[in-house]
Structure formats: structure tokens, C-alpha cells
């Protein structure tokens, strides 16, 4: 949606291309992982993939900082760079510090993996 918005408003060029590129690479890797695991195979690189995704958010955050404070990007309005800056702060926080946390009401799996579900099953 973000890239579509940038294209529709005429700002899908210049340094904005970096975010689209790295996001595309990340999603190719993620969907390859989903395809692999859909065959019932275990992906030994799952943790590397998660690290790559977090790396993507950090680099996009750094990109926003560079656009805001180092490079005078004449193509992208400064407001869009600020939006990117704050968006990636939230993504870095969520994926770095909160990724491991899943509410028990959303946990899916065998009852022994979800203690509340195991109590209800008894």
C-alpha cells in the first residue's frame, strides 16, 4: 500500500526505491519459506529469515535518518521521510522486542503447547 501511494502521488522514485527494493527481497525470502514449509519440510534458516526481516527494518530506519538529516532528497517530501522514520521505529521495536510474545488466546497448537487450552480440554 505504501509503495502504491508513493507511485500514485509521483514520489515513487529517488531514494524511496530502496524501501521497495529491500521489502521485495524480504518478501521473496518469506514466501519461499512459506512454500518450503507447506511441503511439511523444516526450514533450518527460519531464524536467519527473522533476523533478515529485522535487518530490513533497521536499514529502512537508517535510510529515513539519512534522508532527513544528511541528504537533501528533492524528490520525496520531508513529511514522507518523517512518516517512514516513525513507522520503522515501531517496526524495529515490535520485531526486536515483542516478536516472541503471542497472547495465549491467539496461540495455535496442541493443547500441551497452550496451558489454558489444556485445562479446558480436561
Image (cartoon, rainbow, N blue to C red):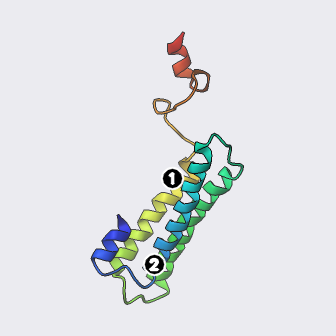
- Residue depth check, mark 1 versus mark 2: number of the one nearer the observer: 2
Q: Nearer the viewer, residue 44 or 93?
A: 44
Q: Which numbered marker is on residue 17? A: 2
Helix, strand or loop status at disc 2: helix
**Dot 1 or dot 2, earlier in sequence:** 2
Asked if 52 appears above or below 38 in the picture, the reply is below
Q: Nearer the viewer, residue 89 or 40?
A: 40
Report whether 100 appears left or right of 75.
right
Asked if 79 appears above or below 49 in the picture, the reply is below
Separation (CA) of disc 1 from disc 2:
24 Å
- Local crowd size for mark 2, using a 10 Å CA cut-off: few (<14), some (14–19), many (≥20): some
Q: Position of residue 30 (x, y in %)?
A: 56, 56
Q: Farthest residue in the right direction?
A: 44
Helix, strand or loop status at disc 1: helix
| Residue positioned 33% across, 74% down in the render | 6
Report whether 73 appears left or right of 77.
right
Q: Farthest residue in the top direction?
A: 122
| Residue positioned 36% across, 67% down in the render | 2
Q: Quadrant of the C terminus?
A: top right
Residue 110: name its quadrant.
top right
Q: Would you name the residue on which mark 1 appears?
A: 94
Q: Quadrant of the N terminus?
A: bottom left
Q: Position of residue 25 (x, y in %)?
A: 55, 67
Q: Farthest residue in the left direction?
A: 9
Q: Position of residue 87 (x, y in %)?
A: 42, 63
Report whether 41 appears left or right of 114.
right
Amino acid at each position: 500500500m505504501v509503495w502504491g501511494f508513493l507511485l500514485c502521488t509521483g514520489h515513487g522514485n529517488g531514494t524511496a526505491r530502496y524501501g521497495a527494493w529491500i521489502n521485495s527481497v524480504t518478501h521473496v525470502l518469506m514466501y519461499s519459506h512459506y512454500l518450503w514449509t507447506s511441503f511439511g519440510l523444516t526450514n533450518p534458516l527460519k531464524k536467519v529469515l527473522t533476523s533478515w526481516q529485522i535487518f530490513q527494518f533497521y536499514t529502512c530506519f537508517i535510510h529515513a535518518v539519512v534522508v532527513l538529516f544528511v541528504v537533501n532528497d528533492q524528490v520525496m517530501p520531508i513529511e514522507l521521510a518523517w512518516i517512514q522514520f516513525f513507522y520503522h521505529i515501531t517496526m524495529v521495536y515490535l520485531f526486536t522486542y515483542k516478536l516472541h510474545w503471542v497472547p495465549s488466546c491467539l496461540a495455535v497448537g496442541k493443547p500441551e503447547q497452550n496451558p489454558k487450552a489444556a485445562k479446558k480440554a480436561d
